[in-house]
Amino acid sequence: MTVRITTTSTKGGVGKTTVTANLGAYLADLGYKVLLIDADIQPTLSSYFPVDPALIAAGGLTELITNGDTDGTITPIDIPLDGEHDGALDIVLSNDPQGRLQQWILHTPDGRVRLKHILADYDDLYDVVLLDTQGAVGPLQDAAVLAADFLLSPIPPEILSAREFARGTVSMLDRLRPMAAMGAPVGPLRGLLYRVDRTGDGRAIADELRREACGESRGQITILDTFIPSAVAYREAATQQVPVHRWEPHRQGPTLSGAETMRRLTEELLPHLIRGGAQHG
């Protein structure tokens, strides 16, 4: 069964695209078939990794949602994967720079839950579907959130921003909870500290969030033990359009390498995949 994960936040600039792209590439190198969906009108994920212009699909996110077009919207990502395993990394490109899709979803009766049901067509094609979202509340973000089995939310490692995350995210989950009546229950959320400078600070903020967010959310929010360190490797890898686990396979010192961070994140987020034999290609 395909696992669908939406990376979301009520704040912009918190690392959603970086996490989505690198997690997807790491899973593909393990041998999984992965589909990225750029559900942001600012198409950062669409240009994170290279694509061959000759292979760009005729349609993108707009056609996927409005027409349910799952065939003519898939573009392969043009990076060589680990040759030992039969993985795949594809993407549905964002193609709505004017934001018209937001209005279409808003004024269509099943607009917010439509994407969830459309993605069922990918169950035999992909092991994991990762959706990247915009950093603002709106109909498109709602549709991506409701399409997921669970949510992943990067959190800035400052306590005030972390508390704002707790309030804003709990409010979002509460607002969307009635959508369960339309067959789209809101999945649980995993909080991921992003750009942590010092391990001790990260642990202290994670503990604070567990007290505030997890209790208030009645079990809907958990804070991961894994966190993304503040390291130049993530920016360098993005500039070169390569996954961070390849750019930084090893690192000296207390900060985890890009490869080790992605390994730990994958094992914590998707333990059933790893235990079932990640390198299954």
Image (tube, helix red, strand yellow):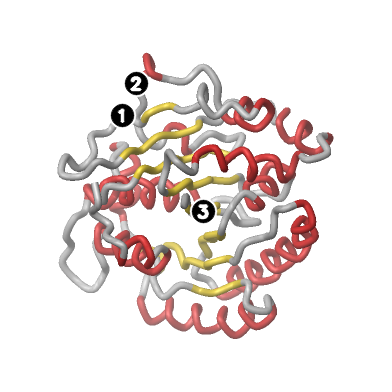
Q: How far apart in space, not on screen, are marks 2 and 3 (Cα)?
A: 26 Å
Residue in the foreground of this view, choosing between 237 and 35: 35
81 and 208: which one is in front? Answer: 81
Say what secondary structure mark 1 lies in: loop
> Relative to 191, does residue 28 appear above or below in the rendering?
above
In depth, the one of 139 and 59 nearer the eye is 59
Q: Kindly report the distance in space between the C-alpha atoms of the residues bearing marks 1 and 2.
A: 6 Å
Q: Which residue is mark 1?
A: 78
> Residue 120 placed where, x, y %?
57, 42
On screen, residue 109 versus residue 263, left or right, reads right
Left or right of 6? Residue 25 is left
Residue highlighted by disc 2: 52
Depicted 204 relative to depicted 24: above or below? below
Checking the image for residue 204, the label placed there is none
- Are discs 1 and 2 less than 8 Å apart at CB? yes
Q: Residue at x 43, y 38 (%)?
A: 125
Question: Which residue appears at 60% of the width and 56% of the height?
Answer: 9
Quarter of the view holding residue 161? bottom right
- Disc with the residue nearer the chain's start (2 vs 3): 3
Q: Residues within 10 Å of mark 1 (few under 14, many from 20)?
A: some
Q: Quadrant of residue 267?
A: bottom left
Mark found first going from the N terminus, 1 or 2: 2
Give the residue at mark 3. Answer: 5
Q: Residue furthest top?
A: 54
Q: Amino acid at mark 1?
A: Asp
Helix, strand or loop at label 3? It is strand
> What percent of the width, then of the height, locates residue 117?
64, 43
Determine whether, in the image, residue 122 is placed left or right of residue 277: right
From this view, report whether residue 67 is shown above or below residue 186: above
In the image, residue 116 sits, relative to residue 14, either above or below, namely above
